[in-house]
Amino acid sequence: MTVALLLARAGIDVTVLEKHPDFLRDFRGDTVHPSTLRLLDELGLGPRFAELPAGRLERMRMHIGGTSVVAADFSRLPAPYDHIAMVPQGDFLDLLADAAAEEPTFTLRRSAAVTGLLSSDEDGSPTVHGVRYRRADGTEHELRAALVLACDGRDSVVRAAAGLRPREFEVPMDVWQVRLPVPSDDARGAVVAHFQAGGAAVSMDRGTYAQVAYLIARGTDAQRRAQGLDAFRSHLGELLGWSDDVVGAVESWDDVPLLRVRMNRLRRWYRPGLLCLGDAAHAMSPVGGVGVNLAVADAVAAARLLAPTLRRHGTVTTADLARVQRRRILPTVVTQRTQHGEHEMLLRPALDGTLTGVPAPLRAVGRSTLLQTLTAHLGGKGLYRERPPAFARRVSAPPRP
Ligand SMILES: Cc1cc2nc3c(=O)[nH]c(=O)nc-3n(C[C@H](O)[C@H](O)[C@H](O)COP(=O)(O)OP(=O)(O)OC[C@H]3O[C@@H](n4cnc5c(N)ncnc54)[C@H](O)[C@@H]3O)c2cc1C
């Protein structure tokens, strides 16, 4: 939606095909980081964003065994981009879609599932010319395009149809997500991650409730459910230090959806006529809650690098598409390596019961406000900034309160 908005603001004809009738996504990527907050202001969307129901997270705290550590302090970043906003992803996407709909060259087709690609095979090198898609009524359609952007997430149909296969990286966990009442001031305005030998859980203040991710060892969903809901509730309560009344809000296994974690990356993000962005190019671990923000940054880079050529020539070359990958590969690799480091340093030992205390790097961060600012800077703003192109900018908004 971000790349569509920016390209439409460049006057380029853009059609977004979305397989669902709406953008409602429970528990998916609700964190909007400082880099994205700044982008929204630059696009003139800050005031509209400020009206959305948002939680405000200023600190990432970890309780490891009996020790509490501040791992990142966003409140030390320059205002107004000094926090993570927690916004339901559906509201955020609706905001972007509404802004894009103000452009005469933008079209959004909902309930339109892409099923395959239109391509030709000239000189043994397949070139993409558009997509096939199915509407909710079962009718089949074709849409020809100078460029197909695969933004269809980690199970990308478009990527598979193009014969692109990501390299998978091992992850130690899957996640159960639950909603609980916020029990105490300690859990307010913060992401609090709890690690012990034998388990891990992360709570995020969502204003009227706490969103809690409970980590299980990868592939153990069925086995863990077979141990019963009481065992889960009591372990969750023990990890978070929350009472039976609070964790009792989980009434059945229907309240505990499984989210399978994946971390992968394409070697090549493009084919002639096609470019993968966001999770379609690189699925991220939920560690740090950065996936949405990386996808948004990919989108800004793609629009900035491709719009001038698309406007001038009505098409792009693979060299143009390669420039987008070159621009975005470093933050992607660095983020995935950092996530891998956290998996191995903290998550795996917690889940397999070998965690013995606060790992040395985290102890150092916990003692230093400078390092807490640095981790907030890297986590919240990324390795470098993706500036929106001049054609996409709108009157800058007043600073967020
Ligand atoms: C457990 C878990 C928790 C996470 N928590 C966070 C978090 O807190 N913060 C964060 O930043 N990131 C988080 N992430 C990662 C984040 O969700 C993704 O990185 C991010 O959503 C990627 O954005 P995207 O636009 O590339 O793909 P998606 O957000 O997956 O969007 C893909 C879109 O394409 C549509 N689509 C799919 N197939 C088709 C098709 N065939 N035709 C048409 N449309 C199609 C989908 O309906 C969807 O709207 C989490 C991930 C997991 C697994």
Image (cartoon, rainbow, N blue to C red):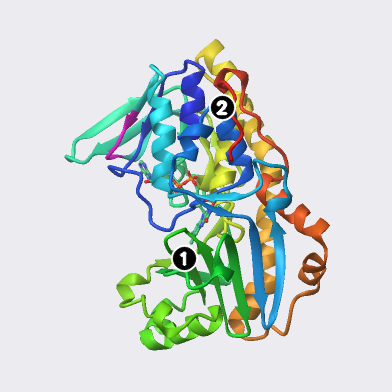
Disc 1 from disc 2: Cα separation: 36 Å
- Dot 1: what SS? strand
Tell me residue 318's x, y (percent).
59, 28
Q: Residue at x 66, y 39 (%)?
A: 328
Q: Residue at x 55, y 64 (%)?
A: 188
Q: Main secondary structure of the magenta part?
A: strand
Q: Nearer the viewer, residue 96 or 224?
A: 96
Q: Nearer the viewer, mark 1 or mark 2?
A: 1
In the image, which residues are magenta?
108-112
Q: Residue at x 63, y 55 (%)?
A: 58
Q: Nearer the viewer, residue 13 or 380?
A: 380
Mark earlier in primary sequence (1, 2): 1
Q: Amino acid at mark 1?
A: Ala
Tell me residue 120's x, y (percent).
42, 28
Q: Mark 1: few, some, or many residues within 10 Å (few <14, many ≥20)? A: many
Q: Residue at x 39, y 45 (%)?
A: 90
Which residue carries the number 2 mark?
A: 303
Q: Nearer the viewer, residue 209 or 347?
A: 209
Which residue carries the number 1 mark?
A: 210
State yes or no: discs 1 and 2 in contact (Cβ < 8 Å): no
Q: Relative to 309, is 148 on the left or the right?
A: left
Q: Amino acid at mark 2?
A: Ala
The label on residue 10 is none
State the quadrant of the C terminus: top right
Res. 248 image quadrant:
bottom left
Q: Relative to 12, is 228 on the left or the right?
A: left
- Dot 2: what SS? helix
Res. 57 image quadrant:
bottom right
Q: Relative to 364, is 183 on the left or the right?
A: left
Would residue 129 be counted in the magenta stretch? no
Would residue 111 be counted in the magenta stretch? yes
* Any part of residue 170 in sight: no
